[in-house]
Each structure stands twice: as C-alpha cells, then as structure tokens.
Image (cartoon, rainbow, N blue to C red):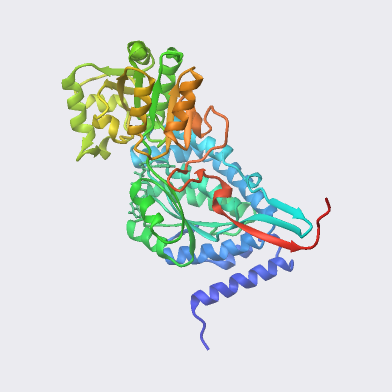
C-alpha cells in the first residue's frame, strides 16, 4: 500500500498534535514543528500549494494549543521584529524606491507596538432560565492575505499579529514590486513564532509572487478567508471569490479647512500628514478644500512649513504632464520626494520642501485621482456647505478617510455625517487616525468596502454560539 505525500504530511501533523496534547512533546516546541514540514525555509515556499498545505498543518497545531501560546507568539513577534524595524524600513525604500526611511521606521514601530493581541477577542454571553450561551471568536483556519507595495512589511507584521491572535495561519501573496521586503518580513515573523515555541509555517509566502500565484491562493479550497490590502483590482477580486473576504481598498482623503480653524496649526498638520512616507498611506491628505476667507493665510503658513507653491499655470501643466499618465498616477512618481518631482520640471529646491501645492479647481486630476505622492491641490470654496459637498464628491464614496480643521461643532458634525468615512480626523494630521499621535490601536488594513473598519484580531475571527441548556444560570 502506498500513501500519497500530502496525506502522509497530514498524518504526521495529526500525530504531532496528539503527542503535544498527551504531553509526549512539550509546548509544541520548535523541534516538533520541524518534523511537521521540512521543505520550507522560514516559511518561504516555491509552490503556493505547498505553502498552503503546511500553513494548514501549523494552524491546526496552534488551534489545539493553549491561548497562552498565542500570547507568547505575539510577544515574541513584538520583541524580535522591533530589532529589525530599521532593516525592514531601509529595505522597503531601497526595493520599492518609494517613501521615506524615517517614516517607514515609525510605521514599523507603531504597528509592532500598537496592533492589538488577545485582549481584542472578547466573548459575549447570554444567561437566563434556559441556561448559558456564549458567543466565542474562533479562527477561520488558513487566511490568504494580499499585501501592497506601499506598506509591504508593515502590513505583513500587522496582519500576522492580528490573524495569529485569532488562531489562524496566514499565506501571504505580496506585491511583486516589494518581494524582497515581504519575504524578509515573513522570515522574521516565522523565526519569532518558532522562538516562542510555536509551529513553523504559521505564516508563509512564496519566493515568486505573481498575479497567477495570487489567483491560485484565492481559489484554493483550504483558504477559508481572504484579506486584500491594495487597490480596487484586488478588492474586487477577493470580493467576487465567493469566500468570506475583507477588502481594504483605495482612498482619496480630502481635508476641509474652515474660518474657525487654528490656521497655523492646520497648515503644519496638513504638510506633516501629506508628506508622511511621501503620501503613500491610503489615509494621507490628498486634496485641501479651504474656505476663501482663510485660503491665503493657509497657503502662506503651509509655505512656512515646507510646502512649495506652484504659482503659474505653465508649471502646473508641466507637473501634470509628468505625474499623470493615461488619466491616473504615473507609477514613476508614486512615493517620490517633492524635491525630486520638482527637479523633473526644472525647479530646484532644498530638502526642507516636503510637499508641492497648487491652486486648482475641483475637477483637476490632481484632486480627482489618488496620486500617492506629495502633490497637493488646494481648492477654494465660498463656505463650508460648498466645501463639504466638494469633499464628498472627491472622496468618490470610498468611505475611507477624511480630515477636517475647524472649531465649529456644527460643521464638524455635519462633515462627519456627510462623509461617512471609516476614519475621520479632526484638527490633526491624517496619520493620527492610524494611531500615530492619536488615540487608538494601529492597523495597515483599513476595510472600508467590507465594513470591518480598522481591522484587528476580531476581524479575522468567526462568531460561534455555544449553548448550554438548563445550566449555569446563577444570577
Ligand atoms: P495594488 O492594488 O497595485 O496591488 C496589491 C497586490 O494585489 C499586489 O500583490 C498585486 O500583485 C495584487 N493584485 C493586483 N491586482 C490583482 C488582481 N486583479 N487579482 C489578484 N491580485 C492582484 O496595490 P499597491 O499599488 O501596492 O497599493 C496601493 C493601493 O492600495 C492604493 O490604492 C492604496 O490606497 C491602497 N491601499 C489601501 C490600504 C487600506 O488599508 N485600505 C492600505 C494600503 C494600500
């Protein structure tokens, strides 16, 4: 009788689980996990099928272990990855040629520190004459996660902590343009898991990321949930997969400034937010809509804080010709420094220039398109009503992020209600919405289209009802 290799692997996995349960092997230590799968190097496979198969075995081990193991794994990921935050930030800039090292470093630090762990998985209970019912948050199994080029390792660390906390394994399908950075992040997370006594291959990926491999992952029967962090294409593809899907898609965050705002502070906050990682975050300010009576003052203050104002139409046209291609952002300029972009239209400035600003109308491509670069159009309006209508229009119903600078409670309330965005930042830079200088936990997967909002462990768990009839009603 012959046994197929995948069946054999499954059997070995089950035997290891039994040995762990019965105490023959202690705490799922690394040596047991090595026996489960020997073909991967730190979770990196050359075949998507192999990666998924081994992630499935690792997930079963995690699920059969105590919650204490998950807590140890998360602690270890935090402790180990922080040692490599600089390395990953540097690698991300070098490989993708986008963003700024110091901001990528901060993004890594914040996600390592502020992604929630087990405290996020709260049970819910009903009790009465008929007994006790508990709603528990249980894992999906193996999750397939698509990650972007704009926050590659940040998203992998963030997703890993949340997904493992909820008891899942993860197969990552990274952006091919951030292959090295993503693979390195997966390796480091694997090492941290094993160091904590967890199973290897809880987090896996492939050495040849491609659209084809992503599609194999999406359609694989052992992938029980899909999470897409990226542009409209990936969100659509996971949402039409027929599986449970979380879609974290594009945004085009407007920033409204009214006459009651602290203009000096608003100007600095806007430049800081817009230039953060050269505007790569989907949450960053993409256009400013300002009430006419304070527009000149705002522009003046922005210039004092590192904004370069393009004054004449010819320069604005020249900029448009290079940064927009076929009606959308030209990838050659995505995430580039303002100084570099300006040099390409013959304007040489110093390092203090972080953002390029230009007055445009509301229909200009700079405002309508998500450019993901430090080019910020400024649109004047008569009053806040007109401003809110334009902001709503420019957000395109994506329900992603909006920012406002105002001290008028009525305007703040109306803006919040009309915009319907997942994140609304009032009187601060956009990044305070993802936990940088604002209260609340961090995520790099902001799910507007599917409604989970700022994802965390509970977003990656299934709600299950456990009913005990007639007992434990002790009120
Ligand atoms: P992208 O959409 O170009 O690619 C993301 C990943 O999806 C890559 O791995 C890519 O190979 C893959 N992919 C692309 N099209 C696919 C398809 N049809 N089927 C399967 N896989 C596919 O993303 P990017 O350029 O790296 O990231 C930028 C975009 O992502 C921006 O629009 C940004 O706003 C958005 N984003 C959103 C969030 C959020 O949390 N909402 C976070 C980061 C980035």
Left or right of 43 in this view: 27: right
Q: Residue furthest front?
A: 129
Residue 270 position (above or below residue 141): above
Query: Residue 163, position in %: x, y?
Result: 55, 52
- Whether residue 473 is visible to the viewer of this picture, yes or no, is yes
Residue 127 position (above or below residue 112): below
Query: Residue 367, position in %: x, y?
Result: 29, 30
Quadrant location of residue 194?
bottom right
Quadrant location of residue 391?
top left
Residue drawn at 36 percent across, 55 percent down: 237
Q: Residue furthest right?
A: 474
- Whether residue 430 is visible to the viewer of this picture, yes or no, is no
Left or right of 436 in this view: 259: left
Left or right of 16 in this view: 270: left
Residue 231 position (above or below residue 436): below
Residue 252 position (above or below residue 467): above
Residue drawn at 44 percent across, 36 percent down: 421
Residue drawn at 53 percent across, 89 percent down: 1
Label total for image: 0
Query: Residue 377, position in %: x, y?
Result: 29, 25
Closer to the camera in the image, 245 or 284: 245
Query: Residue 292, position in %: x, y?
Result: 33, 14
Q: Residue furthest left?
A: 314
Closer to the camera in the image, 330 or 122: 122
Closer to the camera in the image, 404 or 193: 404
């Amino acid at each position: 009788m012959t046994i197929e290799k995948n069946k054999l692997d499954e059997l070995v996995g089950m035997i290891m689980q039994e040995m762990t349960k019965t105490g023959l092997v202690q705490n799922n230590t690394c040596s047991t996990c090595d026996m489960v799968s020997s073909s991967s190097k730190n979770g990196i496979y050359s075949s998507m099928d192999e990666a998924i198969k081994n992630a499935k075995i690792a997930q079963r081990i995690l699920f059969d272990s105590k919650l204490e193991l998950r807590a140890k794994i998360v602690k270890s990921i935090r402790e180990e990855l922080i040692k490599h935050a600089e390395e990953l930030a540097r690698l991300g800039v070098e490989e993708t040629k986008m963003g700024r090292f110091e901001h990528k470093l901060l993004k890594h630090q914040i996600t390592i520190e502020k992604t929630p762990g087990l405290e996020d998985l709260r049970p819910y209970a009903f009790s009465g004459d008929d007994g006790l019912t508990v709603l528990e948050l249980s894992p999906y199994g193996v999750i397939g996660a698509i990650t972007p080029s704009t926050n590659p390792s940040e998203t992998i660390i963030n997703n890993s902590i949340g997904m493992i906390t909820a008891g899942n394994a993860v197969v990552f399908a990274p952006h091919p343009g951030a292959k090295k950075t993503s693979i390195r992040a997966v390796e480091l997370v694997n090492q941290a898991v094993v160091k904590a006594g967890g199973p290897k291959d809880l987090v896996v990926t492939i050495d040849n990321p491609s659209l084809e491999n992503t599609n194999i992952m999406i359609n694989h029967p052992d992938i029980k949930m899909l999470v897409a962090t990226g542009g409209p294409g990936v969100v659509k593809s996971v949402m039409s997969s027929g599986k449970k899907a979380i879609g974290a898609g594009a945004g085009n965050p407007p920033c409204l400034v009214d006459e009651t705002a602290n203009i000096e502070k608003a100007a600095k906050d806007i430049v800081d937010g817009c230039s953060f990682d050269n505007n790569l975050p989907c949450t960053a300010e993409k256009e400013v809509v300002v009430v006419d009576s304070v527009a000149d003052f705002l522009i003046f203050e922005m210039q004092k804080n590192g904004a370069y104002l393009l004054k004449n139409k010819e320069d604005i046209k020249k900029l448009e010709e290079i940064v927009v291609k076929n009606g959308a952002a030209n990838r050659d300029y995505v995430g580039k420094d303002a100084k570099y972009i300006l040099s390409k239209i013959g304007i040489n400035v110093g390092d203090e220039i972080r953002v390029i600003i230009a007055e445009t109308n509301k229909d200009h491509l700079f405002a309508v398109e998500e450019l993901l670069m430090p080019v910020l159009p400024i649109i004047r309006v008569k009053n806040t009503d007109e401003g809110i209508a334009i902001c709503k229009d420019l957000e395109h119903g994506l329900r992603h992020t909006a920012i406002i600078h105002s001290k008028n409670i009525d305007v703040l309330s109306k803006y919040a209600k009309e915009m319907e965005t997942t994140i609304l930042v009032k009187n601060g830079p956009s990044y305070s919405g993802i936990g940088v200088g604002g209260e609340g936990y961090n995520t790099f997967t902001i799910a507007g289209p599917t409604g989970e909002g700022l994802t965390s462990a509970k977003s990656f768990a299934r709600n299950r009802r456990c009913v005990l009839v007639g007992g434990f009603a002790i009120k």
